[in-house]
């Protein structure tokens, strides 16, 4: 899995972003993990919706448009959600441990 730093305008920087680009990486996502360390996130390119079924911890989610700008933010999404949708303009999803996103 490719890892890079990630900088999104208006959001805290991510020192280590894991890019889920292959089918197996996308299917697995954050399943089976007990959390993410501070400064780490997972990105899903070509994606505008997620679920948290089978997850063990709440996450913050940023939906980004084609230019990498946030179009929707979802804070502290609990495990067990069937669908969290970023809208028609969302093209990439970034997931991090709850508390990553600044307060509204």
Image: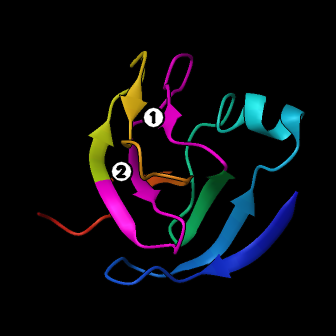
- Return the x and y of residue 5 as percentages of the image width and height: 66, 81
Residue for point 65% across, 36% down = 33
Find out whether the residues at labels 1 and 2 contact each other: C-beta distance under 8 Å: yes
Q: Which stretch did the figure color magenta?
A: 46-72
- Mark 1 or mark 2: name the one nearer the start of the chain: 1
Question: What residue lies at 66% left-to-right and 29% top-to-bottom?
Answer: 31
Decide: is 8 above or below 87. below
**60 versus 28 height, above or below:** below
Magenta region includes residue 52: yes
In the image, residue 50 sits, relative to residue 70, either above or below, namely above
Q: Is residue 49 left or right of residue 22?
A: left
Residue receiving disc 1? 57
Q: Which residue is mark 2?
A: 98
The picture quadrant where one finds residue 101 is bottom left
- What is the crowding at mark 2: few (fewer than 14 residues within 10 Å), some, or many (at least 20)? some
Residue 82: where, in percent of width, then height?
43, 15
Give the farthest residue toward the left: 104
Between residue 90 and residue 7, name the one nearer to us: 90
- Residue 57 position in % (x across, y down): 45, 34
- Residue 30 visible (yes or no): yes
**Residue visible at 39% across and 19% down?**
81
Examine the rendering and report whether any part of residue 99 can be seen. no
46 left or right of 54 in image = right
Q: Nearer the viewer, residue 71 or 61?
A: 71
Mark 1 and mark 2: Cα distance apart in space:
8 Å
Residue in front for this viewpoint, 55 or 64: 64
């Amino acid at each position: 899995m490719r890892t890079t730093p990630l900088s999104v305008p208006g959001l805290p920087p991510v020192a280590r972003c894991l890019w889920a680009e292959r089918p197996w990486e996308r299917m697995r996502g954050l399943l089976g993990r007990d959390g993410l360390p501070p400064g780490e996130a997972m990105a899903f390119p070509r994606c505008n919706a997620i679920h948290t079924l089978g997850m063990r911890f709440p996450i913050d989610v940023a939906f980004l448009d084609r230019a990498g700008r946030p179009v929707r933010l979802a804070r502290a999404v609990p495990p067990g959600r069937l669908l969290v949708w970023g809208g028609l303009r969302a093209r990439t999803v970034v997931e991090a441990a709850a508390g990553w996103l600044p307060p509204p």
